[in-house]
Structures are given as structure tokens and as C-alpha cells.
Amino acid sequence: MENESRNSKGSQFTGFHSSSSASLTQDFHGYEFLLLRKFQSDPALCSKWGEKLLKKIDDDAYDFGEIPYCLWFLAVTLDRKKQRFLNFVRDQFKQARANKIPHSRETLLASYLNGHLFTELHLDGIFKYGDDNTLPLELFKCPSVRWLSLKYNYLDKIPADIGRMANLECLSLTNNKLQNKSIPYTLTFCYRLKNLLLDNNLLDALPGYLLKMPNLETVHRHGNHNYFKSTFMWYHTDVNERILAVSGTNDPSYREPERLQFWAAKAVIGSKIDFYTDPSVAPVLKDYIADIYTLFNVCGYCNRAKLTMQSGIVPNRTVSSFLISLISGFKVITFKNPYLGNTCVPFQHWACSLSCAMAIEIPAREEQIAAARELDKQYDSYIRDCQRQCRVSYTSCQRLSIRRRSRRWQASTSSVGQASPSLPDVEDAEQPPLELVAVAQGAPPSPSSASSISQLSTSCLGLPRPSCHCSVS
């Protein structure tokens, strides 16, 4: 599994930090978040510790022993981010003494985040099991954030406001409880996102809209619930089973007439436009759309959004006319091969109708088959190249060996003619076969003469049979 650890000065993902921008990095940590949340929920405690901190604001040797164990995050904040937090406390008390009434919706967390240009939010393990793990929307209204880490938080959904973070480059969601529906389509509005970590969640497949994010360079997906089992099942099953009808019962509360604002928000959601940056969408409507975004499924093919329902899965071939009225859409499974250096990667899409589901699945299947054939061609080409190189190497070794043996044979016949006068001259001595001479001169051996050349070099010259592993030096 890829290494996800990093230090505060840089990232292990290539190119995330440069030497010039490292000094400009401002990071916000989980202990600061816990402290602000505690003070927000307990104004009396906030006022008490605020006055204490103001009295000792210039004391560098502050005694942390006075801080109770239940406020450990206050001790850590004063130890690591003392000056920043004390300046914030001073500003808050100045506003209180000046009788400046803060905005009704502005929280301590919002004031703290708005007062700094944070580029990294490290919020790992800020929620315990059983806590209300709803992420505050203030976290997603920091336009300068490039790194957001939300690991080990038992999260079962990500707010649609994630799409506000236009400069986000790395999003870490490792070790949570996220399913395919838990990650909203608004993630595609993070156009600069390069690294997405989804390890150890409850995903059966990757969200299909990730294919619409060309800047993605890394997607970690290991350790997900039934991921490899589902991959094997869908990849080897009949292609007709990759389109599954999602059935359910309509919620009666949504059968009543809705306000015009509701239908406008529904149309904007279905259009898939980045409504956070679109000037044609009113600011008040943007917040309303973000609030109700999770109530809808967005079709992966057409511009349509439908209300979600508590549903089950039934095979497509068993859909009857009665179930047609209860179907809320179709789940479509496709495969990308390769995808970011990985093979056989499954993606899950949602389609509002059977025709849209087929429009998603059929081209993806054709692309998958074409990619498989291309990989087969590349493999066959590689095998042929290896065989060709082996033949060339064997032929070169064989030629060199035969040249050496021919020279030895000529030298031996010459030495025999000089040492014994009774023997015939070199010209009258036994000459090498024509095949051996031809090969020694560089001609390739014919298939019919290869065997005779090998036998001749072994029996007549008394040398071992040539091998393609000989050293050419």
C-alpha cells in the first residue's frame, strides 16, 4: 500500500510543496478545532479561560499544570500555536468590549479560519466513535486550502460544500465509513485535485464521476469493504448484470407541491454546473442547493436529478411493469483498464433510466474490450521481440563459435603439415566443409545444414557443442 505519512514541512506526493512556498504554509490542526468547538459550546468556560490567558499573554513561562486534563487540547494549542491563538483571544475580547455584535451565523471556528489564510487542514481523529461526526461547513469555506486530511473520523458522508475548495490538491479520507453515495458529485468542482485517498472505507467501486477529473494523479482505494470481491464478480459476470435496477417506494412527503426555489435547485443540480462559481446563481440559492444536494441522485449521462429513496437492488431482467413505477434509477458498473497505473478498476455510476444506463455501459464495455485487445497486441509484440532477440543472439554466438573453430582447424592442419614432411601439404589436407566455411564468412546457416555443422564441429574438431550463452568479447 502506498505510504500516506507526511511531515509538516512537505508532502510525499511529488510537487505538492516547493521550497519557495513551504515557508508560506499555514496549517490548522485538530487540537485547535477541538478547542474552538469546546469554547463555542460552553461560553462560560470560554470567558473564564479567555480572561486567564489575557492576564498572562506576555508570560513565556506559562504554567501548563493549571490546565485540567479534560482541556488537553488547550495545552497543546498553547504549546504549538501560542502566539496565533492568543492574538485571536485578544481580538475577540476587544470586539466584546467594543460592544460589536458578531454576525448571527459566525462561530468562533469561522472567525478563526477567516482570520488566516490556511493552506492545510489536518483534522485526523477529531471525532470519536458514537460522536456526532457532522463536519462544520466553515471548514469548506477556506478558499486557500490545498491539503485537507480527514482520516480516522468515522465519517459516513462528505458535505456537498467540498466543491467550494477550488484550490484543493490533496484530499485524504482514509479509514472512514464512506460508501459510493457518501461522496457528492460536487467533488468534480475541485479542478486542481491531484491526490485522493480512499483507503479502508466501505466502497464497492470508485465513484464514476472520478473519470471526469483529468487532473487526478493518485487514487488510493485499498482495504475497502468487498472491493476485490465485487471487482471479481462484476468483471467475470455477464455484461447484462452490470446494469442493476434500484427499486424503492416514493416518499409521500415529496409528492406535495414544492416551492419554486426547490425546483430551481433541482434543475441546477441536474445540470452539473459549478454553481459555487457561476455568477448566474444567486448566493442565497447556492447555500440552499448545498443543503439539499444529498437528497438527489445525479444521472451520469443526462442532465437530470432524481430524489433518493431507501432502496434495494433487483436484477434488470426481473423488472416488471409494477416495479417500473417504483424504480428510482439504475446502478451501472463499468471498468477502466488501465486507470492511473492500475488494471481492472471498477466504477459505479447512477443512471435515471435504462436508456441512460445503456449509454453509459455499452461504450465503457467497448472501450474495455478494445483496451484488452490492445494489451494483448502489446504482449504478443513483446513476446515476438524477445524471441527475435534470442534467435539473433543464438545465431551470433553460433557464428562466432564456428569462426573460432574454423581458425583452430586451419591452425591445426598447418602445424601438422610443418611438423611431418611425410604428410600432404596444407593445400592437399582435408578442407573444412563448404557449410562451415560459408558460416565462418558471415553467411547465415541454412536449416538443412545446421545439424551437419553442429555434428561436424563436435565430432571432427572434438569441441563442445556451441551455446547461446557464450561470451562475445
Image (spheres, grey):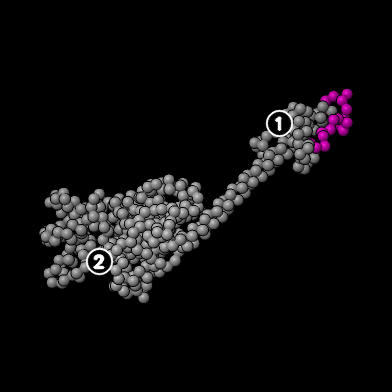
Residue positioned 19% across, 51% down in the render = 72
- Please provide percent x and percent y for residue 185: 38, 62
- Amino acid found under the numbered disc labelled 2: Gly
**Total marks drawn?**
2
Q: Nearer the viewer, residue 441 or 241?
A: 241
Picture coordinates of residue 204, whole percent (x, y): 40, 51
Residue at image position (61%, 47%) is: 380
Q: In this image, 172 relative to 425: left or right?
A: left
Whichever of callouts 1 and 2 sits on the residue coming sooner in the sequence is 2
Which residue is denoted by mark 1 in the rendering? 465
Three-letter amino acid code of the residue under disc 1: Arg
Q: Residue at x 34, y 71 (%)?
A: 263
Q: Residues within 10 Å of mark 1 (few under 14, many from 20)?
A: few
Q: Decide whether residue 436 is among the magenta residues.
A: yes
State left or right for residue 315 relative to residue 412: left
- The numbered dot on residue 115 is 2
